[in-house]
Amino acid sequence: LAKTTQPISMDSYEGQEVNITCSHNNIATNDYITWYQQFPSQGPRFIIQGYKTKVTNEVASLFIPADRKSSTLSLPRVSLSDTAVYYCLVGSYAVDYKLSFGAGTTVTVRA
Amino acid sequence: GAGVSQSPSNKVTEKGKDVELRCDPISGHTALYWYRQSLGQGLEFLIYFQGNSAPDKSGLPSDRFSAERTGGSVSTLTIQRTQQEDSAVYLCASSLAGGPTDTQYFGPGTRLTVL
């Protein structure tokens, strides 16, 4: 089971780029890295997923180094509405499917 | 379109009572997951279903917790003889096939308070 470690919190201002790094030293060969966002009183929602190198979509980028022991979620030009908890998930599919969410990073965006 | 729904949205019960929490996944999703989130904490994996079978029950906190899924659709999480430490938000998610690239779609959760 790949255990993940993230910073507990991060503060930023509107318009800045926010980078959140997740450590997963014992990631397995068939594990994928997925990030979710959670607002208060809501369930998490998918942001981005990757296996290696860089992935970009309309809301974020995900950077994964060659050794895959960490990953960095990058949120460009954040706004107040990006204030949320961000979770790093490392998972693989097997008969004994297991999931590991990090404790989450609370990102607070200020005006 | 219909997302994952959970009921009830809130449940207040007395210590020692049994509770049932229900999850309706997105139609056609074969994989279903239950998580627990205590106040201010991250998500704790409880159990995963692929169809009606649960290949991994290792996350269930104690033998007071059980879950079933019938017809490959609705799932119920049952907590017997509830304790105050069971108070949390219970989240259900579903995904298309349960593979590592699947996106999990979460429901709004059931907030359980044990007095």
Image: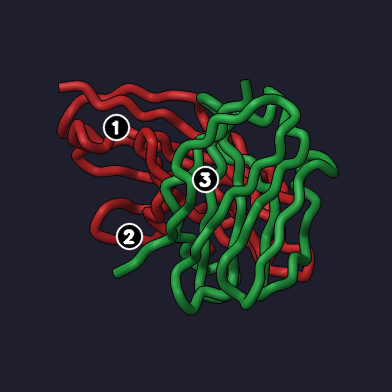
Chain colours: A red, B green
Residue sitting at x 65%, y 26%: B14
Q: Residues within 10 Å of mark 3 (few under 14, many from 20)?
A: many
Does residue B113 lie above or below A28 as drawn? above
- Would you say A16 lies left or right of B67 here? left
Cβ atoms under marks 3 and 1 closer than 8 Å: no
Q: Which residue is mark 3?
A: A88
| Residue A83, disc | 1
Residue type at mark 2: give it.
Answer: Thr
Residue sitting at x 76%, y 40%: B80
Rendering quarter of residue B42 = top right
Q: Position of residue A49 (x, y in %)?
A: 45, 60
Q: Residues within 10 Å of mark 2 (few under 14, many from 20)?
A: some
Residue A23 appears in the picture as rendered: no
Quarter of the rendering occupied by the N terminus of chain B: bottom left
Question: Chain ID for label 3?
Answer: A
First-in-chain label (2 vs 1): 2
Q: Position of residue B101 (x, y in %)?
A: 52, 68
Residue type at mark 3: give it.
Answer: Cys
Question: Chain ID for label 1?
Answer: A
Residue type at mark 1: give it.
Answer: Thr
Give the SS element for disc 1. Answer: loop
Q: Residues within 10 Å of mark 1 (few under 14, many from 20)?
A: many
Does residue A27 lie above or below A83 as drawn? below
Rendering quarter of residue B70 = bottom right
Cβ atoms under marks 2 and 1 closer than 8 Å: no
Q: Which residue is mark 2?
A: A56
Rendering quarter of residue A67 = bottom right
Question: Chain ID for label 2?
Answer: A
Q: Are marks 2 and 3 on the same chain?
A: yes
